[in-house]
Image (spheres, rainbow, N blue to C red):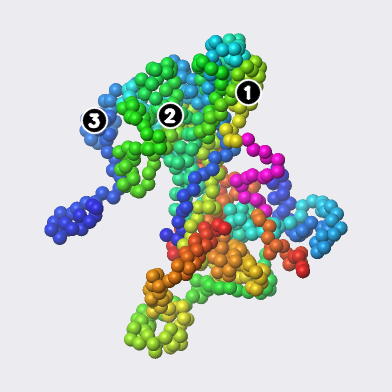
Amino acid sequence: MPVKAIAKSSIARNGVGAYVVPCHKISVQYCNWGGSSTGLRELLKNGQLDNIASKKKGIFFDIFKRTGHPKLTFHYNNDKAQEVEVANLNAKEIEQKIQEYSQRSGAPLFKHNHKVLSINDSIRGIWSPMHTPKSHRHQI
Amino acid sequence: MLRSIARLQRPVLKACRVSVRGYQVARLDSSLKTKYDSLTDYASYRNNIFTHRLPESTASQSPPLVALHSRLNLPSSYTLSTLSQALNLNKFDDGLANNFGLNTLGKNLLSYYVAEHLLVKYPRLPMPIHNGAVDSLMGVETLYEIGKSWGIDVDQSSKLEKYLSQESEFLKYGKLRFVSEESKNDVKEPGVYELSEDEVSSLKRNNSFVAKEIEAYASAVRSIIGGLYTHAGEEATKAFIEDHILSRKLPLEQMFQFSQPTRELIRLCDKLNFTEPVEIRLIAETGRLSAHPIYVAGAFCGVEKLGEGVGSSLSEAKTRSVVNALMSYYLYSPISADGTDVKLPSDKNYKFEGIIGIGDVAI
Amino acid sequence: MLRNFIRRSSTSASIPFEPVPINRYNQVRSQFNFKPKKTQGLIHNPASAIHRPSIKTPRAFLPESDPRRKLNTGPVFTKEQLQDYPIITAYKPQNERDYSVTPEIARKIIELRNEDPKTWTVTKLSKEFGLSIQKVNVFTGILDEHLKTKEVSELTDRQKKRINEKKKRVELWLRNEF
């Protein structure tokens, strides 16, 4: 065989073609008695969480009662789970937390201000001094 | 082992031929209790195992299932019960229909569209690279990754655990079910993974190990595609495969491993009927006495430059230029007359453009 | 739209070749570093880099039906220009290759070599039969002999390491990796 293949897996590009929301499950833990859960209880009682869930159809909301401070756990498709404490937060603040974390990818936050990250090759290649035309080369 | 036995026995049993099975033979799955009138009357084949489909009303009460349906943007004609069936690999638990058929259907659809895409877009890929590219797009590992990215969870808790944690029985219909009820009760040691019988046999057969979970995810992804075909037809399936599988980045440039590139390039030029000699020329260098000399070599055929390579020695630059030339031949991708992508045979108003590869180069 | 426009205009040969932006920047001394003055319209400014094989197919490999054959992309070499580039190795085309060596000649070379390797050296054999040294080497199997005589156990650890490293580097060349 003249050429052999090296096994390589193709690389996912979420958003090229289809986009699948990375956050697929949100566990909402609340306490029926504790004061720190007041905001979350209100969110559950007045049907606001229903509204959020009906807007975010791709996310499975798992709501359960447990003693202790209330907690949101966001499960992402890279097998990461992010826990967010929502003790003593009011309904609006909790809603903001849900909005914020449900839009994340699960990867650690990274400041993209001075780095270029790409899985694609540069279209003009890597510059080399040997490839500038002879008339324009740097001369010592 | 079979072969060696056959060789040993040949002098003794001169008259009879010892057959060695070298290919896969389809066999009936005895656990399906298939009955038929006559062996060749395929229409009379009936499975006597009792299965039923999940009622739509039950399926719609499973939140992970509904969420998965909407996350994948599946059409409303795609019933939730089919989606739930696509996630079920268990043959005997609950008596629910499993995804065996959907998996086969999905696999065929996938291999058709992936092969079509690769053959039209990269008509000159050598056979091993083509096969590698197919694996890269729809291999078990890739499909496992896709299944994970779709947020499919595995149903791992036993009936008792579900009862104790007051978990709704509908939840499991939206989860991947491949662990049998008995093995759920097995005590698991963290960090220790016991191989199942299938896994051990696959390890013996081709010295590669595919975990049951990986295979299960891949099967679920294929089945979801198969289910889409049954409910929404071919157009929608094609769009789905393009969006989820063909949109992935294929690292073709990293998949070539040449053994004798110079010889291969010369044979290739012979095959293309080039009448000029193949010459490797030195294009530039930093100077042989420089601290770290760099050479740029080019592979030429007559006045046409086929490829270029840099290296810290003449032989490195030469080899790289030849490898580059070969890759630029193999990775050719045709465009249509108006500069757009070439149409695929399954597209509307298909007209043949591009080329058909002339086959592999033999060295 | 834009792509089509560029494609249409790039077919005409009137695009000026501008390998580096025209400006008043002094390349030698990096003095007078003014902003470059852009040329209006399309210019042909080829990348000063090696083309990735997946991005550009050389013209010789483009099939007859390909529309890119008609574009003037990249400089075309003339025979005179190629004279500036010294040949490292050249391989004859199919119709000019020499296939005159018969099995009898090959057998004779092997025979002579086996009889008395000291008198029938490779150079002598090549002169006798009018063949290149490489060809005689192939028949006599001298390359194999060399490899066999130098046993791996004879090599020092350092030599072994160097050989292994070289092997790994060559693997990288063959994969077009750095």
Q: Residues within 10 Å of mark 1 (few under 14, many from 20)?
A: some
Label 1 secondary element: helix
In terms of depth relative to the viewer, which is nearer, C176 or B345? Answer: C176
Examine the rendered structure and indicate whether residue C125 appears above or below residue C174. Answer: below
Question: Which amino acid does the dot numbered 3 rest on?
Answer: Tyr
Residue receiving disc 3: B36
Q: Residue at x 65, y 73 (%)?
A: B289
Q: Nearer the viewer, mark 1 or mark 2?
A: 1
- State the image coordinates of residue C156 (x, y, percent, origin top left): 44, 70
Marker disc for residue A97: 1
Question: Which amino acid does the dot numbered 2 rest on?
Answer: Val
C-alpha gap between disc 3 and disc 1: 61 Å
Q: Nearer the viewer, mark 3 or mark 1?
A: 1
Q: Residue at x 31, y 47 (%)?
A: B204
- State the image coordinates of residue B163 (x, y, percent, origin top left): 38, 17
Label 2 secondary element: loop
Residue receiving disc 2: B154
In terms of depth relative to the viewer, which is nearer, B269 or B328? Answer: B328
Q: Quadrant of the C terminus of chain B?
A: bottom left
- State the image coordinates of residue B50 (x, y, percent, origin top left): 29, 22
Q: Which chain letter goes with mark 1?
A: A
Label 3 secondary element: loop
First in sequence: mark 2 vs mark 3: 3
Discs 3 and 1 carry the same chain letter = no
Q: Give the left or right position of residue B300, taking residue C141 as reference.
A: right
